[in-house]
Image: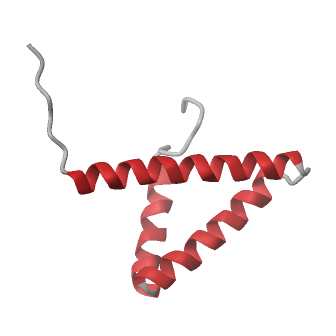
Amino acid sequence: MSIAIQIPFEERHDEDARRAALTYVGEAFALAALDGIHADAVAEAALCAAMCELVAVHGEDNAAQIAARLAERVAAGEFSVSQRQ
């Protein structure tokens, strides 16, 4: 017997949208690499563009709170692609 967990449509849609958005960002990194642009330059530009969008949507204070939480998540290894030692 399997149990299906019902996820509200809005949450499913948000998760699907985030997954699709991450695919678009990955494709942008790949296209930039084909043009000889280093990944760190693309990453910094992506962060700046993302922060501009967050400020436009949520305002400076909320965007700053999001950025502060990102620092904690980075330190915790959430974005690491390799296993932490």
Q: Nearer the viewer, residue 84 or 37?
A: 37
Q: Nearer the viewer, residue 34 or 78?
A: 34
Percent across and percent down for residue 21 are: 53, 54
Figure quadrant of residue 37: bottom right
Instruction: Please tell me which residue is depicted at 61% across the width and 51% down the height of the picture.
Output: 24
Task: Tell me the colour scheme of the image.
Answer: secondary structure
Can you give x and y, in whole percent of width and height, for residue 85 in the image?
55, 29
Residue 61 located left or right of residue 2: right
Q: Where, by quadrant of the figure, is residue 51 drawn?
A: bottom right
Q: Residue at x 43, y 53 (%)?
A: 17
Give the residue furthest to the left. 1
From the viewer's perspective, is residue 44 above or below residue 53? above
Q: Residue furthest right?
A: 36
> In the image, 37: left or right of 19?
right
Compared with residue 40, is residue 30 higher up or lower down, i.e. above or below?
A: above
Image vertical order of residue 24 relative to residue 85, above or below: below
The image position of residue 36, as x and y in percent, is: 91, 50
Quadrant of the rendered image containing residue 34: top right
Which quadrant would the N terminus be assigned to in this image? Answer: top left
Q: Residue furthest top?
A: 1
Front-most of residues 48 and 31: 31
| Number of marks in the rendered image | 0
Q: Is residue 6 above or below residue 39?
A: above
Residue drawn at x 65%, y 47% as measured from the top left: 26
Residue at figure coordinates x 50%, y 61% from the top left: 71
Residue 55: x and y in percent read 50, 82
